[in-house]
Image: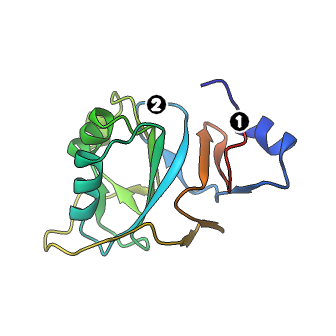
């Protein structure tokens, strides 16, 4: 991947939205790019497990909103599913766990922080719905670019 978010912002400032700086990368890849697939969860990650395990993620980024509920929705097992399904990255408006185990899995994982517990009761999620967090609006089909400087979103592929 030959891009830098700073360069994209300089060259396409009118086409990109910049996610708030509170999201950090915990994954094993230092950058990612791809078409967004959105998923809104209610604390439980069952719908995300199915998506990462069962769908081809080639060229895709999973963008997940759990409205910052203090439960982890991504950990070692989901990162392994994401890698096996060829997802380039995951962006979570919420929390993750298993940071020691996931640091070597070659998928970028941006999140607000960590939490050791997960939500056990099964709830359903909503796929391909508009999301709004981190100061930006995000839709399925948008493109995400992320590196050590941050995360940006564009309505179309620009790199």
Q: How many marks?
A: 2
Taking the image as shown, residue 59 lies to the left or right of residue 81, namely right
Residue drawn 23% across the image and 46% down it: 53
Distance CA(mark 2)–CA(mark 1): 19 Å
Disc 2 marks which residue? 29
Q: Does residue 93 appear in the picture of this structure?
A: no
* Quadrant of the snapshot with the C terminus: top right
From the top left corner, tell me how far across and down residue 152 is, in percent: 66, 50
From the top left corner, tell me how far across and down residue 143 is, in percent: 61, 49
Secondary structure at numbered mark 1: loop
From the top left corner, tell me how far across and down residue 129 is, in percent: 47, 71
Taking depth in this image into account, of 157 and 99 the one nearest to the observer is: 157
Residue drawn 22% across the image and 55% down it: 50
Q: In this view, does 131 lie above or below 117?
A: below
Residue drawn 60% across the image and 55% down it: 142
Say whether marks 2 and 1 touch (CB < 8 Å). Answer: no
Query: Dividing the picture into quarters, in which one does residue 34 lie?
Result: top right
Pointer 2 or 1: first along the chain: 2
Query: Dividing the picture into quarters, in which one does residue 44 lie?
Result: bottom left
Q: Within 10 angstroms of label 2, few (less than 14), some, or many (20 or more) residues?
A: some
Disc 1 marks which residue? 159
From the top left corner, tell me how far across and down residue 106 is, in percent: 38, 29
């Amino acid at each position: 991947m030959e891009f830098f978010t700073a360069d994209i912002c300089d060259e396409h400032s009118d086409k990109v939205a910049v996610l708030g700086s509170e999201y950090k990368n915990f994954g094993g890849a230092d950058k990612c790019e791809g078409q967004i697939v959105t998923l809104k969860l209610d604390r439980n990650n069952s719908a995300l497990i199915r998506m990462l395990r069962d769908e081809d993620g080639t060229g895709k980024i999973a963008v997940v909103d759990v409205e910052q509920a203090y439960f982890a929705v991504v950990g070692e097992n989901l990162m392994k599913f994401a890698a096996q399904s060829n997802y380039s990255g995951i962006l979570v408006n919420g929390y993750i766990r298993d940071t020691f185990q996931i640091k070597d899995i070659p998928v970028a994982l941006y999140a607000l922080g960590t939490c050791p517990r997960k939500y056990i009761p099964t709830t359903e999620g909503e796929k391909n719905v508009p999301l709004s967090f981190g100061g930006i609006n995000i839709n399925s089909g948008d493109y995400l670019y992320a590196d050590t400087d941050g995360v940006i979103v564009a309505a179309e592929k620009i790199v």
